[in-house]
């Protein structure tokens, strides 16, 4: 009696890849829901500066005196009252659950040191770029494009150029 149970919902919606159209529609609906619930457009990097300031504060740094923190004192920062921080936490938990439900969770072995160097350099460049521009690709696309802002459309074009150049650089030097 080795019967396999059939779970059509799981097989159809969690194991198979969704189309780009389905993903785009769902992201759009979630972005609209976020605006309705929080009153703000979708963003990710806004809280990172506060997290870094809070972390430095633990080691005695008086970041409240720094120019970047003049408007929002780190000493009174509350993670649970920060809509962007809660959204970031939801993204991480949601991505983890999606991978688990699709039975795709894997811990992969690092192939070589060049992979680590590429990941560290890429992460630092993305983080620095996001902080310098006061935003990220999520904010640029889900805030700028729907508002027909010029910065959103310029970003839209430049992200494809950057991805093409970055991919070639990655293939040539790190893979």
Image: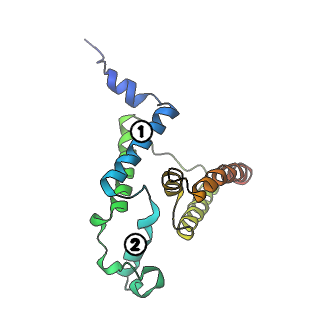
| 2 and 1 marks in contact (CB < 8 Å) | no
Residue at left offset 48%, top offset 55% = 143
Residue at image position (38%, 57%) is 88
Mark 1, secondary structure of its residue:
helix
Q: Establish if 158 lies above or below 135.
A: above
Q: Is residue 121 above or below residue 169?
A: below
Residue 134 lies left or right of residue 76; in this view the side is: right
Q: Which residue is mark 1?
A: 26
Decide: is 9 above or below 95: above
Of the two numbered discs 2 and 1 in the rendering, the one whose residue sits closer to the viewer: 1
Q: In this figure, which residue is indicated by the disc labeled 2?
A: 50
Residue 149 in picture, x, y percent from top left: 56, 57
**Frontmost residue, 162 versus 55:** 162
Q: Give the percent coordinates (x, y) of residue 46.
A: 44, 66
Neighbor class of circle 1 (other Cα within 10 Å; few <14, some 14-19, many 20+) is few
Residue extending farthest to the left is: 1
Q: Residues within 10 Å of mark 2 (few under 14, many from 20)?
A: many
Which residue is depicted at the point 37% across and 78% down? 72
- Residue in the foreground of this view, choosing between 102 and 27: 27
Earlier residue among tags 2 and 1: 1
Residue 123: assigned label: none
On the question of residue 108 being in view, the answer is yes
**How is the model colour-coded?**
rainbow
Give the SS element for disc 2: helix
Compute the Cα span from label 2 to label 1: 29 Å
Please name the residue shown 56% across and 67% down the image: 133
Query: Residue 23 appears at what percent x and percent y?
Result: 46, 37
Confirm whether residue 113 shows in the render: no
* Quadrant of residue 25 within the rendered picture: top left
Q: Quadrant of residue 14?
A: top left
């Amino acid at each position: 009696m080795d019967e396999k149970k059939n779970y059509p919902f799981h097989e159809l919606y969690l194991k198979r890849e969704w189309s780009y159209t389905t993903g785009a529609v769902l992201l759009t609906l979630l972005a609209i829901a976020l605006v309705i619930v929080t009153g703000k457009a979708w963003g990710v990097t806004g809280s990172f500066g506060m997290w870094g300031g809070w972390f430095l504060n633990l080691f005695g740094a008086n970041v409240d005196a720094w120019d970047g923190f003049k408007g929002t004192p780190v000493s009174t920062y509350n993670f649970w009252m920060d809509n962007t921080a809660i959204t970031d936490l939801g993204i991480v938990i949601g991505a983890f659950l999606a991978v688990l439900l699709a039975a795709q969770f894997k811990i992969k072995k690092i192939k070589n040191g060049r992979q680590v160097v590429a990941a560290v350099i890429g992460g630092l460049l993305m983080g620095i770029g996001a902080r310098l521009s006061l935003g990220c690709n999520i904010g640029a696309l889900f805030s700028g494009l729907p508002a027909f802002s010029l910065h959103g459309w310029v970003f839209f074009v430049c992200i494809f150029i950057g991805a093409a150049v970055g991919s070639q650089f990655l293939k040539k030097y790190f893979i």
